[in-house]
Amino acid sequence: MTYSFEPMCVRGEGGSKDGFYGCGDQARCGNRGHLYYVLAIYPDGTSAPSGEVCLEPSEAPGVVPLTQGDVLRAFRRIPVPASEVVVQPPGGETLVNLDTVFSTRADRFTRTVGLLGRQVELEIWPTSFRWVNGDGSAQTTDWPGEPWVHGAEVSDLITHRYRHADKTLVARVDTTWTARYRVNGGEWRDVGGTVTITGEPYDLAVRSASPALTG
C-alpha cells in the first residue's frame, strides 16, 4: 500500500458575492508544521481517505506518524462478539426470592490489522462485566462468573434474587474489552481506551413456588 499527501488548504479570500476561490494558504499545525490530507492507495489501484497528518519541516511527507488515536479507532472497528449470559436454573425460568446464578464466557484473542503502512497486532481481553438483571438493578464484576456445580458455595458465584414473581424480564451481560498493541513486532503498549459491547438479551420468567405434600 502507498500513500499520497495533499496539502490541507485554508479558505481563500473572496467577498460574499464572489464566494470562496482558491487556496489561501496551507493549514498550519504543531510548531512550524503543515496539515496534509492522507489518501491510501491500494495495490488494485483503488484509493480511500486515510485521515490527516501534521508534518513538521523535518518530516518527509511519506512517513505518516502512527498515533494512539489511530490505534484506538482501529480497535473500535474490530468486531467483538456480544457476550451471552448463562442463567441457572436453566430453561428460562427462575424462582422468586431464591438465588439466580449468572455467568458468561469471554476469551482473550488477538487480531492483526494493517494501519498506515504498518502491521499492528492487538491483544484484546475482557476487563469488566455489567450484569443487567432486568428488574432495574445491575451489578459490575471483573470476572465472568462460573456455573454452579454440586458442592459449590453460592456466595462464591455471581447471583441475584428477584423480589417479584409472575414477571418476564430481559437479562444480559455487557462486556468491556481492553487491549494492548505492538507495531511491526515491537514493544507492547496499552491502547488508550476500551470498547463496551452490549450483551445478547435473555428472556427470564420469574415464578412463585408453592409447597406441596408428597408421600
Image (cartoon, rainbow, N blue to C red):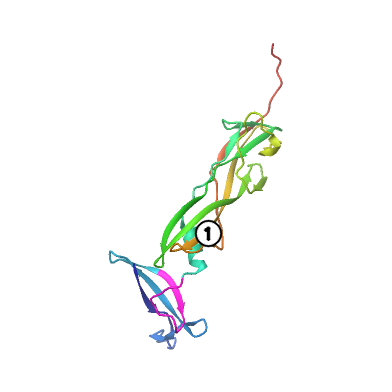
Up-down relation of residue 86 to residue 20 (above or below)? above
Q: Position of residue 160 (x, y in %)?
A: 68, 39
Instruction: Kindly identify which residue carries mark 1.
Output: 180
Please indicate, yes or no, whether residue 159 appears anywhere in the rendered image: no
Q: Position of residue 111 (x, y in %)?
A: 45, 55
Q: Quadrant of residue 60?
A: bottom left
Which residue is rendered at x = 49% and y = 64% of the image? 71
Q: Amino acid at mark 1?
A: Arg
Any magenta on residue 94? no
Q: Position of residue 180 (x, y in %)?
A: 53, 59
Q: Is residue 139 visible?
A: yes
Residue 213, placed above or below residue 177: above
Write down the quadrant of residue 21 in the picture.
Answer: bottom left
Magenta residues span: 50-65
The answer to which of 110 and 174 lies nearer the viewer is 110
Q: Residue furthest top?
A: 215
167 on left or right of 33: right
The quadrant the N terminus occupies is bottom left
